Image (cartoon, rainbow, N blue to C red):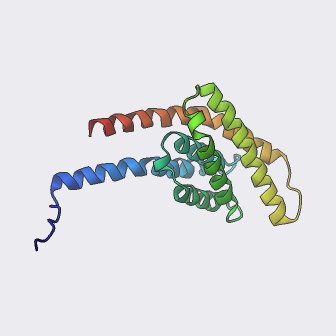
Amino acid sequence: MSRPRRPRLSLGWLVSAADRAGRAALPAALAVLLMVVAATPPDLPSAVPAVAFASVLFWTLFRPAAMGPAVAFGLGLLQDLLTFGPLGAGVLTLLLTHAAAMRWRRVLARQSFLVVWLAVAGFAAGAVAVGFALQALLTFAVPPVAPAVQLFLLSVGFYPPLALLFTRLHRRLERAEAAA
């Protein structure tokens, strides 16, 4: 009886595996970096939820393997920690955003930017409404509407420049994968 051959570990195999792992982790790592950078100006309305929302939505639509529910959960937890929000509110909002994007992914991934941006506005309205309702439930009081409107406008406004950055990165990742 012969023993099955074990794959040989070589430097080329290790480099290739590290390259694949790096490409898979890049969207999440970039989202974390952007969220931390967005958390720095303390006197402005927090852009962290808008950056997290755009990251989860874009990468779920165009590279779903890199933005799974576990990554969306982790980004939601980071959002809650960076914004000092109630733990779980950002997690639930980003998980619902991820689920909605997965549901509409086949349709939206083939549309023009304007159609996707209009869908982003709809998703943002839903995410802000969920966050508003969670805050009302957790505080047993109706929160002010102005921060919710600001968050909606930030989410819709931040999407185009972030989508431009993410699209360029996505194309580079696709070229690297095609070359490998």
1 horizontally vs 100: left or right: left
15 horizontally vs 43: left or right: left
Numbered label tally: 0
Spot the residue most to the right: 141
Q: Is residue 28 visible?
A: yes
Image quarter of the N terminus:
bottom left
For image coordinates 28% across by 53% down, the residue present is 17
167 horizontally vs 4: left or right: right
Q: Is residue 30 visible?
A: no
For image coordinates 79% across by 47% down, the residue present is 147
Spot the residue most to the bottom: 1
Measuring from the top left, give residue 158's x and y in whole percent.
63, 37
The front one of 94 and 1 is 1
| Residue 40 versus residue 176 in the image, above or below | below
Image quarter of the C terminus:
top left
The front one of 175 and 108 is 108
For image coordinates 71% across by 42% down, the residue present is 124
Measuring from the top left, give residue 32's x and y in whole percent.
51, 52
For image coordinates 42% across by 48% down, the residue present is 26
Measuring from the top left, give residue 89's x and y in whole percent.
70, 60
